[in-house]
Amino acid sequence: MKKYLIFTVASLLLMLSCSTKKEKPGGLAGTPGEIKLITLDPGHFHAALVQKNSYEQVADEVYVYAPEGDDVQEHLNKINGYNMRADSPTKWREVVYSGPDFLEKMLSEKKGNVMVTAGNNGKKTEYIKQTLMAGIHVLADKPMAINSDNFGLLKECFDIARQKGILLYDIMTERHEITTILQRELSCIPAVYGEQLQGTPEEPAIVKESVHHFFKVVSGNPLKRPAWFFDVTQQGEGIVDVTTHLVDLVQWEAFPGQIIDYKKDIELIDANRWTTSISPEEFKQVTGTEAYPDFLKKDVENDTLKVYCNGDIIYKIKGVTAKVSVIWNYTFPKGGGDTHFSVMKGSKADLVIRQGKEQNYKPELFVEAVKGVDLAAYEKDLTASMEKVSAEYPGVALNKIRNGVWQVEIPAKYSVGHEAHFGQVTEHFLEYLKDGKLPDWEVPNMLAKYYTTTSALDMAKAKTK
């Protein structure tokens, strides 16, 4: 009897050991078709861009849950366009449930294991929480929180994800833009950048500015935006929307792989918000809606819609003063589009991304030696350092513009465009699902990011009351 018991216990321990080795949080192994996507209430074109490409790990059948209306139809039209294109068509099969109980239906059926959400940001944080509680992974478009209440709920969401062993991740496409990647690479080379300057509120050491447009072209067609996109209680103000990307890039570039603790590493200094005016004609052109809906009338002055879509934040992160700002115009100049400006200031050089008219609205990266640097010695160090960068990114080279200023020449193959970055983010997320975890710094840094934006909104609002 004693021998039998020993054998049984040993067998159980062996089985548990084998089980522990095979099973990962979420129970995913990276096999073909293993990921079954759910798209929840897609009201933003970013939801469709996740499916612009196919992925071996993702099944072709995708379950869509949404209220009836234009939003879901616009989403399905974009997916159909990807399926019908001549070059590398996809094979998505959208299984759609539309009705007022779409959320409850999704949660009860649980037909997928990864939920994608990009749409009404006022509802998004609650969508995320409910989905995580059902044991489903979440890949969310930014922003995941548009006010302080949302931020409190988002902290709960990460706790739920940790307890259930599932992943919550936001779509940070700008990390995949090549000029940003190389700006980060060069800032990590002391011979090129020196030490990170601390900066001041008057002269921040890191500056990131983004200009966006309501009327634009996506996947070759004029973008139709839902009317609610212009309601900051649903979309979020500019200071908590696009600035999410900018705050993320400050963290990702200046402190690569480091954990940011928002309680001790972030200090807000100043924040501002202001409006962009939209005429009735412009509103109709971009939404297809004849008149302002009732929920927007609170923001209408003399027949002109005033949208709080602009903002800036000055803050310290681990002692470094940074400034991020976002501006929304109605549409872009001829030949232009959304633009990005960025400068990182080191003791030896400034690393500057420009994307204006002089650059034909294409982002370009410059290395600008600071005053007082021995230019002959610096150029030698810079050239040697760029050889190492070129080994990792073949074809990248230096073009000397004038004394102390160089443009980083980047082959066109690296400039894949904003839409392609959604596929790159998704591929990373699929790898994290296979690993069963995010990098250790991702969750605390997401919290730091949303603390920064939502607290800045509180500060800006207090100034404009």
Image (spheres, rainbow, N blue to C red):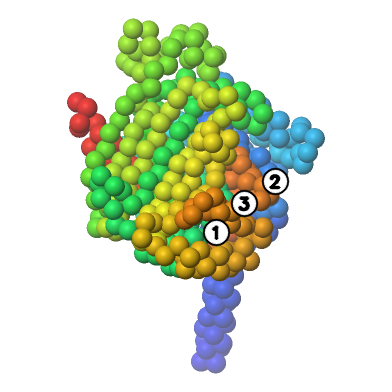
Disc 1, SS: helix
In-front residue for pair 84/386: 386
- Kindly identify the residue that appears in the image at 49 percent across and 14 percent down: 282
- Mark number, residue 410: 3
Q: Is the residue under label 3 in contact with that under label 1 (CB below 8 Å)? A: no
Q: Position of residue 253 (x, y in %)?
A: 44, 56
Q: Earlier in the sequence, mark 3 or mark 2?
A: 2
State if disc 1 and disc 2 touch (CB < 8 Å): no
User: Callout 1: few (<14), some (14-19), or many (20+) C-alpha neighbours within 10 Å?
Assistant: some
Looking at the rendered structure, the kind of residue marked 1 is Tyr
Q: Which residue shows up at 54% across the image and 77% down it?
A: 17
Q: Amino acid at mark 2?
A: Ser
Q: Residue at x 60, y 66 (%)?
A: 387
- Foreground residue among 304 and 262: 304
Neighbours of disc 2 within 10 Å: few (<14), some (14-19), many (20+): some
Q: Position of residue 188 (x, y in %)?
A: 45, 64
Give me the C-alpha separation between circle 2 and circle 1: 17 Å
Q: Is residue 386 above or below residue 202?
A: below
Determine whether label 3 and label 2 are within 8 Å by CB: no
**Residue placed under numbered mark 1 in the picture:** 432
Is residue 67 visible to us here?
no
The CA span between labels 1 and 3 is 29 Å
Which one is closest to the eye, mark 1 or mark 3? 3
Circle 2 sits on which residue? 54
Give the Cα distance between marks 3 and 2.
27 Å
Label 3 neighbourhood size at 10 Å, few (<14), some (14-19), many (20+)? many
Q: Which mark is residue 29?
A: none
Location of residue 120 (image quadrant): top left
